[in-house]
Every structure is written in structure tokens, then in C-alpha cells.
Image (tube, rainbow, N blue to C red):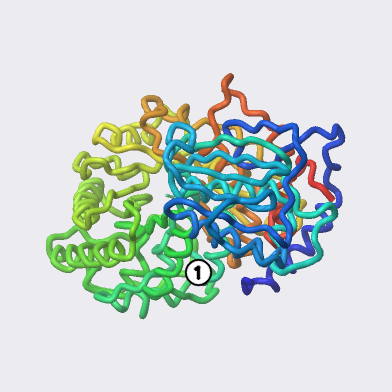
Amino acid sequence: MFVRIPALLAIAAAIMTVASACTSPDENGDAVTGIIPAPISYEPRDAAPFRLTAESRLVVAGSGAAGVAETFAEQARRATGFELPVVEGMPAASDVSLVVADGEAPDGAAEGYTLESGADGVRIAADAAAGLFRGTQTLRQLLPAAIEQTDAAPAPEGGWTVPAASVADAPRFAYRGTMLDVARHFFPVEDVLAYVDEIASMKLNVLHLHLTDDQGWRIEIESWPELTGIGAATSVGGDGGGFYTKDDYRRIVEYAAERFITVVPELDLPGHTNAALSAYPELNCDGVAPTPYEGTEVGFSSLCASPDRAEATDRFLAEVTREVAELTPGPWLHLGGDESLSTSQADYLDLVRRIAAAGAATGKTVIGWHEMGASRELPAGTVGQYWSFVEPKGTAAELTRSFVEQGGRVIMSPADVAYLDMKYVDDPQGPLGGRLGLDWAKGPTTLDEAYLWEPTSIVPGVGEAEVLGVEAPLWTETLGSLAEVEFMAFPRLAAVAEIGWSPAAPDGRRDTDDFFGRVAALGEHWDAGGTVYYPVRGVPWRE
Ligand code: TNX
């Protein structure tokens, strides 16, 4: 299906040696439903399980149900070899019924759904197609892991069964994302599509693409062709460049949209711009294009705030934001704002005002890293993304509250728990010898740490109503292949996905044992689908 086998095999081989040393499966025989993120409610029904067979059909009703059915069927057909036609009409006991109709989701939530399964069939119902799709991802996890197979292998022992259960579900936060840095290293479209499928299974609804940085500009801009003509040739370590043509990018957006995932494009401005500056001398204060950059330092580059450069800089800002906004059906445009360490505060504030205004002029809602909160001239509703890892009393908290004071909300991405590029704790002894990832945010990050944080307790004054959601960023200075991306993302992304979706624990304590048990179930799906993950110690991985 996806062209990524060799890199994957290399890592998978290394991992298998470690996996066999991991703890044994759940010995108590406890019913672990294996759903991640945990649903609002899961009740086993006193009934025989559902069986998906060669006779099964996907019986659809309501707006958007057929599209959701096709997306689900595509993978299920591949794995089972069954025909699984998408039809309308009366469902039979061997069918999966997919219904969009008013009053089906808990509280009418757009992404909510109910799922009933048993010998009498499966019925997933939602108020909107988005909720129906989320429900099919629960079904994906309730089916045997072999449902992830990329070709029809023999059916699992016992057949394609789904336990008899009633599920009612809806997300806690509206924004549940992950960021992929395609600037430090470039990832081809097929890799991004594979990643989209993987994150869809955890009910994430945002893929933030960090499209530009010092080391590369990765999105075609017709009015500034050298951004990719010159600015896309490099990456960290001289690993080669690349960029998305507009058609490539549209493919990603469309594929994500079929999975009800919004792509948030990021143009990182005014810092992190060496690639753009190297392509256009007129964007530099001294009129000289710097040489391309393939290192990993941050904070040395910036657009020029000088009035001499205002014409070129403002035209650049207007045109790049317009072209990227035109490619973006979603509501958000991320314009960076982080680590502009080579500009004076006055210049930074001037540039941020112009950058955010250009973004808002496209009709999109601007998102900025928390440093952008230094500006008191942000367009109303600008969203802040908090990434600090220091105590909340510091400046980062004040900068973050500034977005709320200006009518915006906040995405929580605290680096010490939510950054997927932080090393795993055991990795120095692990399969990759500590080669992947960074550790600047308070050292390596365990799966427990990724799981045991509460987005509404990070910044005082930014509570449930002010938190738009959560996002787990993955910076790729040290990551050059999809397999390496997957290795850093999984299983920790599952933890952040659950924080974003599942209800807050009533006593404020999440149950790691229960979570680890469900991660093990997800691990079987990853194995079957060829997704690489780090076999974190303490998770009862199944053989
Ligand atoms: C900080 S966090 C950055 C990135 C780096 C990352 C490495 C943030 C907004 N900026 O430029 O890639 O650390 O972890």
C-alpha cells in the first residue's frame, strides 16, 4: 500500500529483539476493550459477538454516511478480502449499519457517536458524518488487529468478530492534533498519507504541518517561485530536500478531510526563515541572500523590520499567506512567531503585527506559538500555542494569557510531556541507541509523563473554556524517515490523543495501568498494519 517497507524493516528488526524482552500479556484475563482514546462509556452487552463475514454489507443512511462507509470499507476489504458493498436499505444481522441522523450522538456533538454491536449486527450512528467516522475508528479497534493488514491474509482464529457492546462517545476538546515538521526533513506525500491514517485511528482531528523553517521551504508559492526553487533544496544534515507542489498539498488536504482531519499549514515567521531569505535577497536587511542552512541551531534568522524592506516584506507576507490560505479549507493558518532571537523586541512586535494582519486578511484565524502573545495588536481571536515546559509562573504563561485577553483560545503543547521528539527514557539502551530525538525539555519523556498531564492545569487563567485543545508536535531534526517518525510518535501520541478526547478523570487521576493495557491492544494493530512503535517498558505488549 505505502512505499516505506525497507526503512520499516530495518527498524522493525531492531525492535523485535527488544519487544520479546517486554512484559507478558494481561494475566488477569480482564476485559480490556482496547479502545484509545477511551470512550465516555463502554458497556459489554449480554449477547453473542458480531461476525463480519463475506455476506456483510455496509448499510448507509443520511448525509455523508456513504463516504465514511467507503473510507472504512477500503481498508476492511483489503484486510478481509470481502466485498463489503456499500448499500442503502434494511440492515441484516451480518451488516454494519452506518447512520447519520439528528439526535443520534450524545448531546448532539458533531464528532460524537453511538455504537451498538452484537450478533444482531453493528450499528454506528451520529448527528454528523464526522462523528460517524470517529465511530468507525472505534469499530476498527474493536475488530481483530488483522483488520490493519495491507493484504488479505487468512482470517484471524475465531473470525472477524466484534464483542457485543454499547458505546456512547464524544470528544472533550474541539482541537486534537499532532504536528509534523516537514521542514527539517522532508517527507513525501505517501508518508504523510500513511501518518494521517495512523493518527485518524486515535480520533485526532488536526494535522499541523510545519511547512517552512531555516532548513527548507516545503510548499510551492507561485508568486515567489524561488522559495522552493532555491529554498527547498536542503534539509538537516544534507539529507536532500523536497517540497509539495500545490497538487501534492491538495492531495494531503483531501485525504485528511476524508478522515475528518483538518490540515493546519504553518509558515514559521518572522524567525526560522533562512530558507526564504536564501531564496530572495530583497527580504534581507543587507540585501544579501544568506547561504542555505543544514544545521540544527535555532533563532538566528529573521525577516527584516526595516522600512527599506517594507514593500518587499509586506508583499511577501500578503502573497504567501494568500496562496496558502487558498489551499486551506480549514479555518486556521499558523504563522509561527517562535524563537525570533535575532530581532529586537520592537522589531519583533512590528513584524508580528504585520504578519498576523496579513494572515487575518486571508479570512483565516491565525495561530501563533506563545511568543506571539507579546503583541497586543493581534487580530481578535488569534489562537496561542503554548509550548513551554517551565513553571507556569514564568513569562510563557503571561504570553499565553495574552491570547485569551485578546479574545482567543489556547492549544496546549507543553514540551516536557507533549513533544514527540523528546527521547524515550530507555532508548539509550534501546534499539536505536539513543540516536533519535532530543532531550532539551527536562530530559527524556516517559509514556506515563505523556499521559499524566492535564491541559487545564498548565497555565493559571487558562481553564476548560480557554483551552481549544491539545497538540503533540514532532520536530524532525533527527528523523529522516516515516519509520523514525512513527517510532517517536507511537505510543506517546496515543496518550495525548486520549487527553484530548476522553473525559477528565473524576478525581483528576488517570489510570495508567488501564491505559497501558489498551496501548498493548493498539500495539497488535500497529504490528498488523506495519506501524513502527517504541516498545515502552511496563506496557503488557502481547506476543
Ligand atoms: C523548539 S518549540 C522549536 C523548534 C525545534 C524544537 C526541537 C518551538 C516552537 N520551536 O524550532 O525544532 O524546539 O524540539
Amino acid identity at mark 1: Phe
- Residue 211, given in percent of the width and then of the height, sits at 41, 63
Determine which quarter of the picture holds residue 314. bottom left
Please say if 363 is above or below 513.
Answer: below
Query: 348 or 133, which lies in front?
Result: 133
Query: 41 or 377, which lies in front?
Result: 41
- For the image, the number of numbered tags is 1
Please say if 465 is above or below 192.
Answer: above
- Residue 309, given in percent of the width and then of the height, sits at 16, 65
Q: What residue does disc 1 label?
A: 186
Query: 11 or 158, which lies in front?
Result: 158
Secondary structure under badge 1?
loop
Write the residue at 60% across / 31% down.
41
**Is ligand 1 within 8 Å of the beta carbon of the residue shown at mark 1?**
no
Q: Residue furthest top?
A: 507
Q: Is residue 19 left or right of residue 393?
A: right
Please say if 543 is above or below 216.
Answer: above
- Residue 511, given in percent of the width and then of the height, sits at 67, 29
Residue 456 visible to the viewer = yes
Q: Residue furthest front?
A: 90
Q: Is residue 511 left or right of residue 237?
A: right
Query: 259 or 62, which lies in front?
Result: 62
Write the residue at 55% across / 60% down.
87
Write the residue at 36% across / 80% down.
229
Q: Is residue 167 left or right of residue 369?
A: right
Q: Residues within 10 Å of mark 1 (few under 14, many from 20)?
A: many
Residue 433 visible to the viewer = no
Quadrant of the snapshot with the N terminus: bottom right
- Residue 283, given in percent of the width and then of the height, sits at 24, 68
Determine which quarter of the picture holds residue 31. top right
